[in-house]
Image (tube, rainbow, N blue to C red):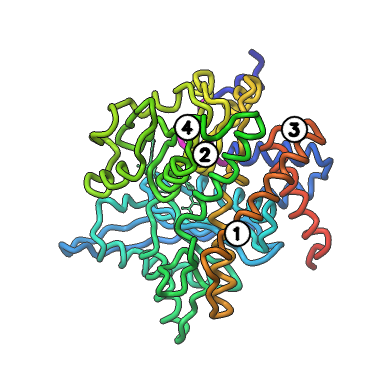
C-alpha cells in the first residue's frame, strides 16, 4: 500500500474528526467534478463564523460544572443560517463544523433559502434534571445571542434536544429583545408557533425517499423488509411510517441494543414499550438482538437514524441491505461509501434523505414570521412535493453524469451555493 493509500485507509477514532474529513472529501470530489478553482474551494471549505463558549451550570445540589458549547455558521450566501442544536457528551468543534457544512448543502439541494449552521453542547442530557437543562439552554442561548436571530441564524432540535429546549431558547432570545420572536427557532411546541407536521417531518421525508428508492430498484414496498437504527425523533416515526405503508420492519436498535422479528415488529407497540422502559431492549413482542448485528441483516432497506460513522469500512463489507437511506447525518464514512457503491448498494445520502426536517422548519419559520398557521395537509403535501422534486433532481443528475447519489447531491448543492457567491460577488 502506498503512503497516500495508507493515509486514506487510516482509522480516525474521533467521530467528529472523521465526519469533518468525510465532509471535506465530499466537497473536494464535487469541486473536482464541477471544475471549480482553488479560491471557490477554499471559501466553501471554511466556516463563515465560529463561536466557542463556556457554559457554567449551577447544579440542583449547588455544585458548579462547566460545559463547552459551539455555534458554527458554515455559509450564509443563500439566506440566514439554519441548523440544529445537539446535546451530546461527544460533541466537539470538528463534528459541529461537519454538520454545519452538510446543512449548507442540504438547504441548497432542496432549494430552501437558508445557509448552513449547527450548534452543540458537550453534555449528556440524560444525566441532568429538566431544571438543569433549562439553565444550560438559557446560558448557552445568552452566550450565542450575537449570532442567532430570525434573519441571522435559526436553531432547531437535533440529538439530545427537543421542543422544550426550543421553547427555552425562544423565550431567552425574546426576553433579551423585549418582545416575542417566534421565528428565532423552529421545532417549537405547537402552542408557541410550532408547525403542524414538524415533529415527524424528517421521518416523513425519509420514508418518501425510501419508497421512491425501493420502487427505483423494482421492489414493491409492501413485500419489502427494513431495519431502522435509532428510535429517537427520526428513527421512531420512520419505523412507524414504514410499518404503516406495509414494509416489514424486522429490526430496530437504539444505543442499548436491538430487537428482531422476522415477520415485522409492531412499531406502535414498540413505541409504547420505549415510553415506559426508555429503550427498545426488553420489548416482549420481539427477540433480543445485538445492535451491531442489526445493521448486517439481509433486508431490502437499512435506515441508519442514530449517529455518524456507524457504517465504516469494516462494517460496510457486512451490509446486506440493497438500499441504505441515511436518516442520520453522516452515518456512512467515505471508505464505507466506496465499498457500498462497488457492491451495488444504493445509498440515498443524508442531505437528501433527512431533509424533510429542514423543509418543514422552513415552513414553520414562514408561518412564524407571518403569524399564520397552515393545515397539516398543506404542510405534508408541500413536503411530499419538495422531497419528490429533490429525489428527481438527484437521481436525474446522477444518471446523466454517472455519479453516485451522494456525489450528485453534493455537486448539485455546491453548484447552487457557488452560483449565489458568483452573483453576489466578493466583498470588498
Ligand atoms: P435523538 O436523540 O432523538 O435519537 C437518537 C437515537 O439514536 C436514540 O434512539 C439513541 O438511543 C440512538 N442511538 C444513539 N447511538 C446509537 C448507536 N450507536 N446505535 C444505535 N442507536 C443509537 O436524535 P434524532 O433527532 O432522532 O437524530 C438522529 C440523527 O438524525 C442525527 O444524526 C441527527 O443529526 C439526524 N437528523 C435529525 C433531524 C431532526 O429533525 N431531529 C433532522 C435531520 C437529521
Q: Which residue is mark 3?
A: 403
Q: CA distance from mark 2 to mark 3?
A: 26 Å
Tag 4 or tag 1, which sits nearer the N-term? 4
Secondary-structure class at tag 3: loop
| Quarter of the picture holding the N terminus | top right
Query: Hey, which residue is sitting farthest top in the picture?
Result: 1
Mark 3 surroundings: few (<14), some (14-19) or many (≥20) residues within 10 A: some
Q: Which residue is mark 2?
A: 17
Tag 3 or tag 4, which sits nearer the N-term? 4
Secondary-structure class at tag 4: strand
Residue 16 inside the magenta-drawn segment: yes
Residue 147 visible in the snapshot:
no
Mark 2 surroundings: few (<14), some (14-19) or many (≥20) residues within 10 A: some
Q: CA distance from mark 2 to mark 1?
A: 38 Å
Query: Hey, which residue is sitting farthest left in the picture?
Result: 61
Tag 1 or tag 2, which sits nearer the N-term? 2
Q: CA distance from mark 3 to mark 1?
A: 29 Å
Q: Which residue is mark 4?
A: 226
Q: Position of residue 327 (x, y in %)?
A: 51, 43
Q: Nearer the viewer, mark 3 or mark 1?
A: 1
Q: CA distance from mark 4 to mark 3?
A: 25 Å
Residue 198 visible in the snapshot:
yes
Tag 3 or tag 2, which sits nearer the N-term? 2
Amino acid at each position: 500500500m502506498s503512503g497516500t493509500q495508507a493515509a486514506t485507509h487510516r482509522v480516525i477514532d474521533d467521530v467528529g474528526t472523521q465526519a469533518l474529513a468525510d465532509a471535506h472529501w465530499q466537497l473536494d470530489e464535487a469541486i473536482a467534478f464541477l471544475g471549480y478553482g482553488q479560491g471557490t474551494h477554499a471559501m466553501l471549505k471554511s466556516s463563515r463564523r465560529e463561536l466557542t463558549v463556556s457554559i457554567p451550570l449551577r447544579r440542583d445540589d449547588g455544585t458548579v460544572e462547566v460545559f463547552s458549547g459551539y455555534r458554527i455558521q458554515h455559509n450564509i450566501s443563500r439566506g440566514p443560517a439554519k441548523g440544529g442544536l445537539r446535546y451530546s457528551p461527544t460533541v466537539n468543534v470538528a463534528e459541529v463544523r461537519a454538520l454545519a457544512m452538510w446543512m449548507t448543502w442540504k438547504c441548497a439541494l432542496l432549494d430552501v433559502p437558508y445557509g448552513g449552521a449547527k450548534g452543540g453542547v458537550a453534555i449528556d442530557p440524560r444525566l441532568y434534571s429538566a431544571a438543569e437543562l433549562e439553565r444550560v439552554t438559557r446560558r448557552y442561548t445568552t452566550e450565542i445571542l450575537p449570532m442567532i436571530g430570525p434573519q441571522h441564524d435559526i436553531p432547531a432540535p437535533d440529538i439530545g434536544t427537543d421542543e422544550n429546549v426550543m421553547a427555552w431558547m425562544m423565550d431567552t432570545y425574546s426576553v433579551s429583545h423585549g418582545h416575542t420572536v417566534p421565528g428565532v427557532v423552529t421545532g417549537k411546541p405547537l402552542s408557541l408557533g410550532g408547525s403542524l407536521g414538524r415533529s415527524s417531518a424528517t421521518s416523513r421525508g425519509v420514508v418518501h425517499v425510501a419508497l421512491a428508492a425501493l420502487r427505483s430498484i423494482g421492489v414493491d414496498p409492501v413485500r419489502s423488509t427494513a431495519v431502522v437504527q435509532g428510535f429517537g425523533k427520526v428513527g421512531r416515526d420512520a419505523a412507524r411510517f414504514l410499518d404503516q405503508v406495509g414494509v416489514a420492519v424486522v429490526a430496530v436498535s437504539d444505543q442499548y441494543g436491538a430487537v428482531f422479528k422476522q415477520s415485522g415488529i409492531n412499531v406502535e407497540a414498540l413505541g409504547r414499550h420505549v415510553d415506559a422502559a426508555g429503550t427498545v431492549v426488553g420489548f416482549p413482542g420481539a427477540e433480543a438482538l445485538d445492535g451491531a448485528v442489526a445493521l448486517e441483516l439481509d433486508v431490502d432497506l437499512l435506515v441508519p437514524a442514530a449517529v455518524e460513522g456507524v457504517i465504516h469500512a469494516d462494517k460496510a463489507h457486512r451490509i446486506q441491505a440493497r438500499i441504505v437511506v441515511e436518516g442520520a447525518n453522516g452515518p456512512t464514512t467515505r471508505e464505507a461509501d466506496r465499498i457500498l457503491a462497488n457492491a451495488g448498494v444504493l445509498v440515498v445520502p443524508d442531505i437528501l434523505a433527512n431533509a424533510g426536517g429542514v423543509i418543514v422548519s422552513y415552513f414553520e419559520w414562514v408561518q412564524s414570521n407571518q403569524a399564520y398557521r397552515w393545515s397539516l395537509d398543506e404542510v405534508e403535501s408541500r413536503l411530499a412535493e419538495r422531497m419528490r422534486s429533490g429525489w428527481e433532481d438527484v437521481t436525474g443528475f446522477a444518471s446523466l453524469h454517472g455519479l453516485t447519489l451522494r456525489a450528485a447531491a453534493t455537486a448539485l448543492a455546491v453548484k447552487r451555493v457557488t452560483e449565489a457567491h458568483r452573483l453576489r460577488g466578493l466583498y470588498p
